[in-house]
Image (tube, grey):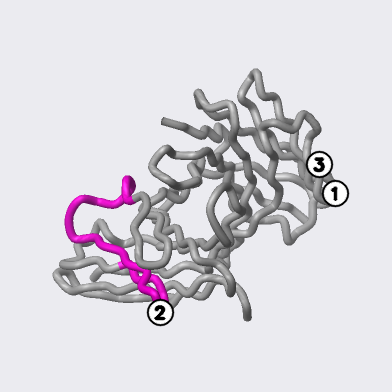
Amino acid sequence: AQTVTQSQPEMSVQEAETVTLSCTYDTSENNYYLFWYKQPPSRQMILVIRQEAYKQQNATENRFSVNFQKAAKSFSLKISDSQLGDTAMYFCAFAAYSGAGSYQLTFGKGTKLSVIP
Amino acid sequence: NAGVMQNPRHLVRRRGQEARLRCSPMKGHSHVYWYRQLPEEGLKFMVYLQKENIIDESGMPKERFSAEFPKEGPSILRIQQVVRGDSAAYFCASSPGQGFQPQHFGDGTRLSIL
């Protein structure tokens, strides 16, 4: 079974600064996908960034980038130039073929990020 | 809005009643996942359905919970004889087809049990 661990329940960052959220996972699969989702107070689940395990290059989406270390099973999210709208819960998630026909997502418990003006 | 539509947004039930949560996938999507989010937790997989078929229900509680995705109409997550522990946010996600495809989430239904 896959597990996803986010060791930082809460973090804060000053507006315009950079913050890194950590995530580790455990799997015996070789082909899988990793994601960061953002859940603002409105409770929507918004995909921030995704990474395919077979790609060595780290994914980047505007101010968001990841540091994917496959051997260490680590997948951290870096947010640059933090904005007030980045305040949210951030969930790390993992997907691999389940063997039962699905690519269900396995989520960590989340990191609550507060951006301070 | 062509996104995943869930309704109701908030559902209140008394213990012992039935709860029905509906999910209409994005246009062109025929695969639906249901997840449950307990307070202060991440989302947990419940069930994966294609039109008229349950493909993976390994995350569904063995009793009181059922799901369907009929040929016509939305997917339904049904909880019979609700208990306080069923209070949670229930999210639906859809994807276009087989193999790995990104899942697009609805806004969730918050179920409160009195």
Report the magenta residues as a range: B57-77
Q: Identify the amino acid type marked 1.
A: Asp
Write down the quadrant of residue A100 in the picture: top left
The structure residue drawn at horizontal position 17% and vertical position 74%, both measured from the top left corner, is B17
Q: Is residue B66 above or below residue B28?
A: above
Q: Is residue A84 above or below residue A101?
A: below
**Residue B53 in the image: x percent, y percent?**
35, 61
Magenta segment: does it hold B72?
yes
The residue furthest top is: A71
1 and 3 marks in contact (CB < 8 Å): yes
Find residue A81 and name its label.
1
Magenta segment: does it hold A73?
no
Q: Chain of mark 1?
A: A
Q: Callout 2: 10 Å neighbours few (<14), some, many (20+)?
A: few
Q: Identify the amino acid type marked 3.
A: Thr
Q: Nearer the viewer, residue A105 or A112?
A: A105
The Cα–Cα distance between marks 2 and 1, rounded to whole angstroms, is 46 Å
Find residue B72 and name its label.
2
Q: Which residue is mark 3?
A: A18
Q: Chain of mark 2?
A: B
The Cα–Cα distance between marks 2 and 3, rounded to whole angstroms, is 48 Å
State the quadrant of the C terminus of chain B.
bottom left
Write down the quadrant of residue A47 in the picture: bottom right
Q: Chain of mark 3?
A: A
Q: Are marks 2 and 3 on the same chain?
A: no
**Residue B34 in the image: x percent, y percent?**
41, 59
**Residue B64 in the image: x percent, y percent?**
18, 60
